[in-house]
């Protein structure tokens, strides 16, 4: 089959899943005008427990409640898939220090760079925002280089 | 925030459900799948971001050109336009390094909890720690902005 090397798992799973991701953004946008990204939740949620000024800015405090609801929805939606399609829980083999260390950098980078894979990658690109397109090109190139470097160093997985 | 209606929160919850289902269905909630993409072993992940972007692009174009105001909030429809500055690049580099090391990004991490991936809590703890660190540092920088210029 043509493309079997590039797409060993086909493309249907990815494209259909992607359409649902965009559909979730579209539902919220059409009903409320809000463009929902996933990473602002990290800072807005910190405003519940931290007095650091940056987390307690108006745009965060005013949106922190619905961002919690949005994140709960994400967890539950994925759980629906796990129950009816996946057939139970799935856990990663990726080592804990990669998740923790990478997570710290993701937390810093997404907030410094004004968005993540959903904010810039899906919503910003969907808005044809040049800022978002530059950000996505940057993080994509660096991520590819980093992942291949880690792989070359023999870290599995 | 407290004046938001139940319909508002139910809509947000529904949108999150669909969003999270998509991340699980596409397998992007699995770090291995992201790493396989970044290591050029399976390019399917392009269709997740591509498929999602096509849907949002059509939705944004339709709403901004045809629709008037959002029914639940009464606000105008606008596109997501963030200003460009050096932080967009620096943040992109740091985010990319983290994504390449861990194979996980914020939305996919929340969805990963939903598929039963308890191990992903390491990544979520890291993300909160990273967000907290930059918030502390930038709050300090902002405080000192009134004084002499500082090297950040």
Image: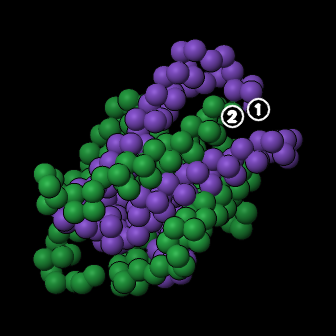
Could you tell me which residue is drawn at 24 percent across and 84 percent down?
A156
Say which quadrant the C terminus of chain B sits in.
bottom left
Q: Position of residue B33 (x, y in %)?
A: 33, 67
Could you tell me which residue is drawn at 36 percent across and 59 percent down?
B95
Say which quadrant the N terminus of chain B sits in.
top right
Q: Is residue A93 left or right of residue A23?
A: left
Give the residue at the far front of this rendering: A1
Q: Is residue B99 left or right of residue B41?
A: right
Q: Is residue B37 left or right of residue A108?
A: left
- Relative vertical location of residue B47 with respect to residue B84 in this rendering, above or below: below
The residue where tag 2 is placed is: A32
Could you tell me which residue is drawn at 49 percent across and 48 percent down?
A21
Which type of secondary structure does the marked residue at label 2 adopt?
helix
Q: Quadrant of residue A144?
A: bottom left
The answer, for residue A36, to whether it is visible in the render is yes
Q: Quadrant of residue A120?
A: top left
Could you tell me which residue is drawn at 40 percent across and 62 percent down?
B28
Q: Are marks 1 and 2 in contact (CB under 8 Å)?
A: yes
Shade of chain B as shown in the rendered figure = purple
The residue where tag 1 is placed is: B72
Shade of chain A as shown in the rendered figure = green
Q: Position of residue A152 (x, y in %)?
A: 13, 77
Q: Nearer the viewer, residue A52 or B31?
A: B31
């Amino acid at each position: 089959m043509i493309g079997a090397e590039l797409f060993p798992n086909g493309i249907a799973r990815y494209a259909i899943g992607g359409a649902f991701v965009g559909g979730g953004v579209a539902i919220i946008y059409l009903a409320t005008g809000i463009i929902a990204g996933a990473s602002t939740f990290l800072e807005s949620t910190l405003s519940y427990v931290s007095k650091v000024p940056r987390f307690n800015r108006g745009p965060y405090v005013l949106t922190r409640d619905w961002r919690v609801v949005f994140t709960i929805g994400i967890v539950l939606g994925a759980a629906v898939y796990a129950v009816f399609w996946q057939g139970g829980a799935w856990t990663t083999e990726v080592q804990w220090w990669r998740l923790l260390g990478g997570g710290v950098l993701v937390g810093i980078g997404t907030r410094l760079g004004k968005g993540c894979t959903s904010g810039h990658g899906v919503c910003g690109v969907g808005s044809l925002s040049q800022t978002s397109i530059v950000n996505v090109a940057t993080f994509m190139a660096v991520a590819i280089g980093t992942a291949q470097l880690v792989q070359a160093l023999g870290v599995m997985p | 925030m407290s004046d938001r209606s139940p319909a508002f929160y139910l809509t947000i919850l529904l949108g999150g459900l669909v969003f999270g289902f998509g991340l699980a269905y596409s397998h992007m909630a699995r770090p291995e799948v992201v790493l396989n993409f970044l290591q050029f072993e399976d390019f399917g992940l392009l269709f997740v971001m591509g498929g999602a972007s096509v849907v949002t692009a059509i939705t944004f174009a339709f709403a901004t050109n045809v629709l008037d105001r959002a029914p639940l909030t009464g606000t105008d429809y606008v596109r997501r336009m963030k200003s460009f500055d050096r932080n967009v690049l620096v943040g992109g580099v740091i985010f990319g390094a983290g994504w390449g090391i861990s194979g996980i990004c914020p939305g996919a991490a929340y969805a990963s909890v939903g598929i039963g991936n308890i191990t992903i809590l390491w990544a979520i703890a890291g993300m909160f720690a990273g967000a907290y660190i930059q918030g502390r540092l930038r709050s300090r920088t902002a405080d000192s902005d009134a004084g002499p210029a500082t090297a950040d």
